[in-house]
Image: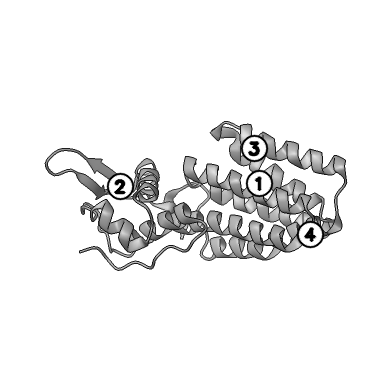
């Protein structure tokens, strides 16, 4: 029987699907060595497309949480031995993920709002666009450093050196967490789309839209970090 799972909200569908499936494994809804329900049932339970579900399962397979078997007894199985985040380099203290994500959730939308509202120059906008394009063009192994630079550029334009410094310090902590989870191609593509929405809102001087786009972007990353590390 497919466990009852809360439907995914509209927005960060891929990231939240991954989070829910990883949580289900940790909660024992899907046990090590156990065959997972058929894709159709899982997709219906989560309220997502089968394409989204397959992408999420593919990410979990790459990270060592599930394996795919072919043939008569084929299907997706939870791995007998699961990755143990507590054994990864830089062991995480209790509550650190929540602290880092809460700080980011409070500060970065406000910073994007300020940057949009203060009205940046054409030269500054061109630099921000170039930073965004560098993220778009980056190979996967260079994505995260350029992603960080893009966010820090927005912070540097908000007009508050204190807030900019808070973003800088917290971003270093975010990156330490991100280093513990795999690079997932669907997430990187979605993240780049969200960057475009943030950039457009800043260009239009729309503080509310900039804050909302940043908040949605942050929630997607938070879903992945909670799924893999909490």
Q: 10 Å neighbourhood of mark 4: few (<14), some, or many (≥20)?
A: some
* Disc sitting over residue 163 in the figure: 4
Asked if residue 120 can be seen in this view, the reply is: yes
Of label 4 and label 1, which has the lower sequence position?
4
Residue located at (23% from left, 53% from top)? 38
Q: Which residue is mark 3?
A: 135
Residues under labels 3 and 2: Cα distance?
Answer: 30 Å
Residues under labels 1 and 3: Cα distance?
Answer: 11 Å
Q: Is residue 152 left or right of residue 74?
A: right
Residues under labels 3 and 4: Cα distance?
Answer: 23 Å
Residue located at (46% from left, 61% from top)? 230
* Disc sitting over residue 66 in the figure: 2
In the picture as drawn, the residue positioned furthest to the left comes out as 72
* Coordinates of residue 177 in the picture (x, y in percent): 55, 51
Q: Is residue 40 above or below residue 64?
A: below
Q: Nearer the viewer, residue 81 or 60?
A: 60
Residues under labels 1 and 2: Cα distance?
Answer: 33 Å
Asked if residue 184 can be seen in this view, the reply is: no
Of label 1 and label 3, which has the lower sequence position?
3
State which mark lies toward you, 3 or 2.
3
- Assess whether mark 4 and mark 2 are in contact (beta carbons under 8 angstroms): no
- Assess whether mark 2 and mark 3 are in contact (beta carbons under 8 angstroms): no
* Secondary structure category for the residue under label 2: strand
* Secondary structure category for the residue under label 1: helix
Of label 2 and label 4, which has the lower sequence position?
2
């Amino acid at each position: 029987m497919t466990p009852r799972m809360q439907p995914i909200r509209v927005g960060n569908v891929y990231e939240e699907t991954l989070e829910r499936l990883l949580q289900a494994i940790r909660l024992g809804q899907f046990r090590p060595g156990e065959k997972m329900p058929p894709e159709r049932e899982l997709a219906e339970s989560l309220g997502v497309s089968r394409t989204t579900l397959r992408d999420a399962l593919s990410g979990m397979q790459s990270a060592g949480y599930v394996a795919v078997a072919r043939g008569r007894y084929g299907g997706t199985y939870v791995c007998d031995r699961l990755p143990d985040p507590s054994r990864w380099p830089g062991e995480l203290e209790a509550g650190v993920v929540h602290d880092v994500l809460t700080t980011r959730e409070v500060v970065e939308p406000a910073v994007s709002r300020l940057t949009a509202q203060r009205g940046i120059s054409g030269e500054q906008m061109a630099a921000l666009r170039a930073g965004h394009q560098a993220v778009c063009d980056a190979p996967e192994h260079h994505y995260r450093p350029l992603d960080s630079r893009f966010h820090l550029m927005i912070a540097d334009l908000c007009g508050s050196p204190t807030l900019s410094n808070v973003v800088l310090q917290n971003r270093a902590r975010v990156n330490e967490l991100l280093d513990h989870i795999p690079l997932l191609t669907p997430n990187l593509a979605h993240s780049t789309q969200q960057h475009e929405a943030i950039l457009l809102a800043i260009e239009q001087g729309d503080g509310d839209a900039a804050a909302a786009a940043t908040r949605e972007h942050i929630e997607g990353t938070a879903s992945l970090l909670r799924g893999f590390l909490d």
